[in-house]
Image (cartoon, rainbow, N blue to C red):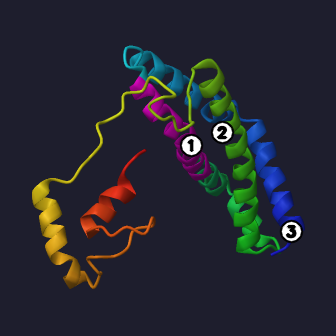
Amino acid sequence: MSLVVTRAIALRVLWQIRRDPRTIALLLIVPVVLLVLLKWVFAGEPSVFLSIGVPLCGLFPFIVMFLITSIAMLRERTTGTLERLMSLPLSKPALLGGYALAFGVLATIQAAVVCTVGFTLLGLDATHKGPEEGARPWPEEIRMSDEVKALVDRRWSEYGIDANAANLDGTRRTPTGLFSAATRRD
């Protein structure tokens, strides 16, 4: 695989996409419009928009790049450009690498635009907030029922774990006590 050929194919694909306003709109405008529509739809429930808006900033490049790559390869095939490319002295990995490089650059630009709009204009927040840091509703702490604790305590020997294992502070606890101590939020 020649890096010069891969770079040339990537530049050709970028040049071709640059002249297609529909593809540019699909790349940059549609994801932003969808994010704004979601903000508007969930205006009464900001926590819902926060929970789905951030993952969508990461999913948009994958979904849109899949569509645009499919459309570009179909266009190459229908116009006969793909056959002409395959008749040149280049390898299939170089062709695919050029496309991957070009669409990787476009995905990076798209992610930057979508994240800039989402995080600056729409108020998305991707940081993990604890209960004391934000206004998001937090569930109650999950605890095992007494029946489950008793069942786990009875079955430790079947799992090959010492039921009287020492805790990190040197005290002895039952395995259920070790489990609940490990999952407890302080």
Q: Position of residue 147 (x, y in %)?
A: 9, 59
Judging from the image, what secondary structure is the residue with disc 3 in? helix
- Which secondary structure is most common in the magenta stretch? helix
Quadrant where the image shows the N terminus: bottom right
Please say whether residue 111 is one of the residues in the magenta stretch.
Answer: no
Q: Which residue is mark 2?
A: 111
Left or right of 97 on screen, residue 3 = right
| Residue 26 against residue 10 in the figure, above or below | above
Q: Which residue is mark 1?
A: 58
Residue stretch in magenta: 47-70
Please say whether residue 54 is one of the residues in the magenta stretch.
Answer: yes
Pointer 2 local density, CA inside 10 Å: few below 14, some 14–19, many at least 20: many
Residue at 65% in and 22% down = 120
Q: Which residue is mark 3?
A: 3
Q: Position of residue 91 (x, y in %)?
A: 76, 75
Residue at 83% in and 51% down = 11
**Label pair 2/1, CB-CB below 8 angstroms:** yes
Q: Dividing the picture into quarters, in which one does residue 27 lie?
A: top right
* Callout 2 amino acid: Ala
Nearest to N terminus: mark 3 or mark 1: 3
Q: CA distance from mark 2 to mark 3?
A: 26 Å
